[in-house]
Amino acid sequence: MNPMHRMEQLVAELNTYNYHYYTLDDPQISDKEYDVLYDELVALEQTSGLVLPDSPTQRVGGEILKGFTPHRHLAPLWSLDKAQNMEQLRAWNARVVKLVND
């Protein structure tokens, strides 16, 4: 399959999943399934050097829902970086410990 065509498919699919997840509060797939598709898109973008303007890799979240007030975190949130196994979890933990100690 043409890499650009696959990127277009992934962007459309992931944007639909984002809309259901963030705006409708009605997830259509698991986080793990989403991550597989997202990681495929990231790899294609890196390989091709192209990023489509509506790519979900260029933003976090979706449409802001009514009824929520803006919130600014006082300290950075430390994500698990999508750790999928013990080795990745240990690497994440080492980064957090280093940040705390620094």
Image: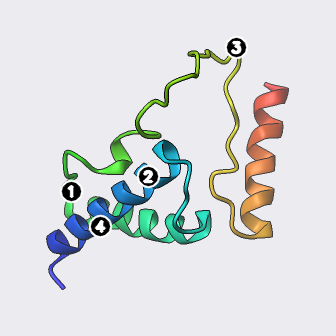
Give the side of residue 45 with respect to residue 95, left or right. Answer: left
Horizontally, residue 71 falls left or right of residue 97, namely left
Location of mark 3 (residue)? 74
95 or 33: which is nearer to us?
A: 33
**Residue at the spot x=50%, y=25% of the render?**
66
C-alpha gap between disc 4 and disc 3: 35 Å
Where is residue 17 shown, x and y percent of the image?
43, 59
Q: Secondary structure at mark 1?
A: loop
How far is mark 1 from mark 3, CA to CA? 35 Å
Q: Which residue is mark 4?
A: 44
Q: What residue is disc 2 on?
A: 18
Q: Indicate the quadrant containing the C terminus: top left, top right, bottom left or bottom right.
A: top right
Q: Is residue 4 above or below residue 23?
A: below
Quarter of the figure with residue 84: bottom right
Quadrant position of residue 87: bottom right
Q: Secondary structure at mark 4?
A: helix
Q: Position of residue 89 (x, y in %)?
A: 77, 59
Residue 8 picture location, percent across and down? 20, 65
Q: Earlier in the sequence, mark 1 or mark 3?
A: 1
Q: Residues within 10 Å of mark 4 (few under 14, many from 20)?
A: some
